[in-house]
Image: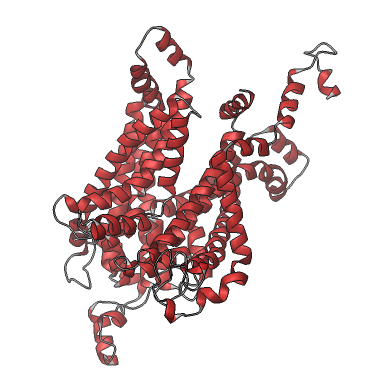
Amino acid sequence: MTELNNTRDNPPGAPSIQAEMVATRTRTPYLYFLIRDPVAVLAALWLLFLLFCALFGEWLFGDLARGMNLAARAAPFGTTEGGLVNILGADALGRPILARIIVATRVTLGIAMASAIAALIIGTLIGLWAGFKGGWTGRVIMQLSDVLQSFPSILLAMVVLYMLSPSPLNLILVLAVGQLPVYIRVARAEVLELRERLFVDAARVIGARPYQIIAMHIGPMVIPTVINIVTIDFALIMLSESSLSFLGIGVQAPNITWGLMVSQGKDYLETAWWMAFFPGLMIMLSTLSINLMANWTRRIRDPRERWRFERAKQA
Amino acid sequence: MGNFVLARMAQSLISLIGLVVLVFFLVRLTGSPADLYLPDDASEAARQEYIRIHGLDRPMIVQFWEFFSGLFRLDLGESLRQARPAAQIVLEAYPTSLKLAGLTMLISVIGAVLLGVWAAVRPTGLLDRVISILSLASASAPNFWVALTLISVFAVWLRVVPTSGIGGWEYWILPITVLTLRPLGLLAQVVREAMIRALTAPYVRTAKSKGVPFRSVLFVHALRNASLPILTMAGNQAVGFINGSVVIESIFGFPGVGKLMIDAIQQRDFAVVQAGVVITAVVIFLMNILIDVAYALLDPRIRHK
């Protein structure tokens, strides 16, 4: 702080603008804004609940979710017969929907998270390389990425999953490949701008190798941008996975995901609506919470919108 | 402008060729059609005969050349299942999908502009919050689930619309409603964001102080300047339309190109898959040109470059 006070623009003793800014920043942590925004709080709580289900769901409800119980076949929504776990009804084999939803959290989120991270890492690396190399290599990579982007990703996934078996690993790869172009494009665009900067020239002059420049000088500057994208991408991948599972070429039984549960329930629409309704609701609430949180973090970080939160605080 | 479009066309042509190569080999990896089209107990000789008749025994590269040279004669091969030109089958399915896409985009854009502008008038106000959450929710909903839910409520329970199939206008209500949700939600957010930015610009203050009615400031001055990001998102959604229509057309039994493609992949009808992809790529290519032209029309800076 004292250092900032002694800048040339400010007479000694007067609080500098910079110090003021630093002070406001440290005085209002993100958590403070979060608590004041009930919608964001709900979304955060929901995500915490999902995390809990993903970690402990299998251990708590694993047997209930997979064991048949003919007595409770297609038990209706709202029943408490056979325990509270049947409150959302049961499926055609008498397995409680609630237990299955909770157990499915792990695979649903796991697949989406794995593909999102795979797409993030691979796409960013390719994009960094394409941007740094430039020239002919860069153009070929961009052209290929354009091909990938113009092809409807769901058709690509269908062809590949028919060709290979729809195992979780293949599913993760297919979903990740569909998202690669986004990261390639963004990472490349950032590098094209960054590699003209002075610090990159400086690194080159003192003899840093290309991979060192990418890893130590350019990479860290690109990471915040791609991290921003990955949160929204995560929700998108979850939707894609559920679509594929719904079409029957995604996750296969005995694994459970929400998309697969909707698919299993769709034949009972007229007699037992709860079988397809609640798993789908879970997908929607979860993607919505992720998007809400992503949106909220973006707004709070964006100086163009942040002042509105600050003003609301003072009022 | 002409050069710009030409350069884009050349670039798209390379992408198109890459796509064709990719699809040709990918669909052939899904397995032999002989396993699917002949009965399980067909003799080995019958299988060989089938494979020979359809030219599937020739080297891959010969098959590829035949397909590739056929492209220049506008010959996209013949469907294994229906024994007629694949291009004809795809082109018959296209009008339905394009009509679906056109109506969906029209409703989404109009709705999104109204909602987004309304929300942007008072950012972080109550209305803004409600619209923001609703638009996020509508972009987050899995469309197959919304489709099933709407079917159970309006078709099964209330019986006001048919469950699936094609016919009069009442068959279009549910598919269009479902397909509208995502573009509408995403676009409304973009409109809001772009309008908030546009409304803080000096020319808005000038217009207001000159006494221009607020409605004209919103819809004439600010919206025009906010239109570029809106166009980008609308273009993306229009180009990616087939992704959503694959699932929705299957659920509603709509004879569009999405359903055709999913069926063709399942039936290993190579020629139809290839024709579908090539024609879709051409449609996307034309749409991209339209979008570029729209950019130039909206933004004089692009036009005069």
Viewer-nearest residue: A181 or B65: A181
Image position, residue B240 (x, y; %): 36, 49
- Please name the residue shown 49% across and 72% down the image: A167
Q: Residue B86, located in which quarter of the rendered image? A: bottom left
In the rendered image, is residue A26 in sight? yes
Asked if residue A187 is positioned above or below residue B231 in the image, the reply reads below
At x 61%, y 45%, the residue is A132
In this image, A6 relative to B114: left or right? right
Asked if residue A139 is positioned above or below residue B77 in the image, the reply reads above
Along the line of sight, the residue nearer the viewer: A210 or B145: B145
Determine whether B226 is above or below A192 in the image: above
Q: Seen from this angle, which residue lies furthest front? A: A81
Q: How many marks?
A: 0
Looking at the image, which is closer to me, B131 or A64? Answer: A64
Quadrant assignment, res A57: bottom right
Classify the position of the C terminus of chain B by image quarter: top left
Nearer to the camera, A24 or A244: A24
Q: In the rendered image, which quarter is residue B228 located in?
A: top left
Residue placed furthest toward the left: B168
In x, y percent, where is residue A67?
50, 79
Measuring from the top left, give residue A196's x and y in whole percent.
63, 35
- Percent across and percent down for residue A23 are 75, 26
Q: Quadrant of the N terminus of chain B?
A: top left
In screen coordinates, is A191 left or right of B228?
right
Is there any visible trace of residue A121 in the rendered image? no
The image's colouring method is secondary structure
Name which residue lies at 44% across and 14% down: B203
